[in-house]
Every structure is written in C-alpha cells, then in structure tokens.
Image: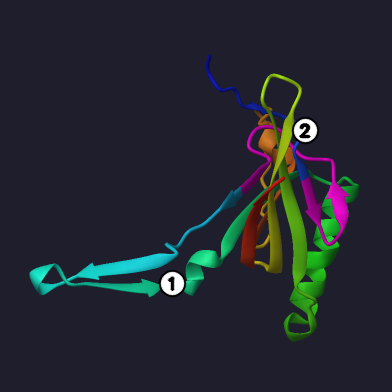
Amino acid sequence: MGVFAMSGNDTVIINNRNLSDLAEGMCAELTFSSDISQVKTGKNGNAIFALNATGLQADFKLRLVRGDADDQFMNNLLSQQNANFAGFPLMIGQFIKKIGDGKGNITNDSYIVSGGVFTKQVEAQSSVEGDTNQSVAVYTMKFSQATRVLT
C-alpha cells in the first residue's frame, strides 16, 4: 500500500498575527536561495568542506488580498522599517503546513522564522482586462533563520 500526503489548511503567522486573508494561487512561498555548505575537491581526491551560513537564510513571499486588514497590518510593519531601519524590531513568524496521511493522522510541518526584514516594496498594477493580480499585495521578506520542525 502506498504512502499518502494530504496538504491543506496551512497557517502563516507574522509577529504573532495569524494571517488569514491570503490571496489565490501560490499565496505563501518559503525558499532558500543559498546552499548550506560548499565542497571543493582537489588533487588526489582531497576534499574541503565549509559551512555556508547564508544558506540558513530564507526568502518568504506572501500574497495578501490588497487593502484588507492583513495587508494593512503588513504595510504598517513595512512603513515602520522604512521610517527607522536601525530601530525596526526584526520580524518573527511561523509557516505551518498540515500534512494528513489519509488515515486521520496529521503532521505539522513547520518553519520557525526569525530575524526578518522586508526586502522589496509592494508593487502595484492596473488592468482593464480583469487581471485579478491587481487586487493582490505581494510582500517579499528575508529571515536570517528558518528552522524546520516536524510534530
């Protein structure tokens, strides 16, 4: 018999606020842009290994319904960072995926993130052809630490 993984009801929390007004499609995406280690192989098969601490950094893209309460909350944080970068309290959060096994058991696949800042401004567009992306606010952040925990 095969193994099943059923995804749904994911949770995104930033600064202790459960964000519920997520947009359509890929509404939350956590990625790691750097490798966590480097390897160089030299003469006679000798190898040198090095930890790459930047590989612990996570990029987080969040798509929210533009203008709603969660967008206002995140925009307020972005405004605080823009107004006083050195005094901005770094963001914390959680990205929790709920994975069912088809037998009623659920595993929480969580990423605990800390040391977060915004890395881009929220962009905008206007469409006369009904493009729904014009009603989405995209927040781009980077966290210095992202630890995966399975419970």
Q: Left or right? Give the position of 40 relative to 115.
A: left
At mark 1, the secondary structure is loop
Quarter of the image for residue 151 reads top right
Quarter of the image for residue 133 reads top right
- Magenta part of the chain: 12-29
Check the image and name the residue furthest to the right. Answer: 69
Q: Earlier in the sequence, mark 1 or mark 2?
A: 2
| Residue visible at 36% across and 74% down in the picture | 50
Quarter of the image for residue 78 reads bottom right
Mark 1 to mark 2: distance in Å? 33 Å
Q: Which residue corresponds to mark 1? A: 52
At mark 2, the secondary structure is loop
Q: Left or right? Give the position of 21 relative to 102.
A: right
Magenta stretch containing residue 18, yes or no? yes
Percent coordinates x, y for residue 59 in the rendering: 58, 58
Q: Which residue corresponds to mark 2? A: 9
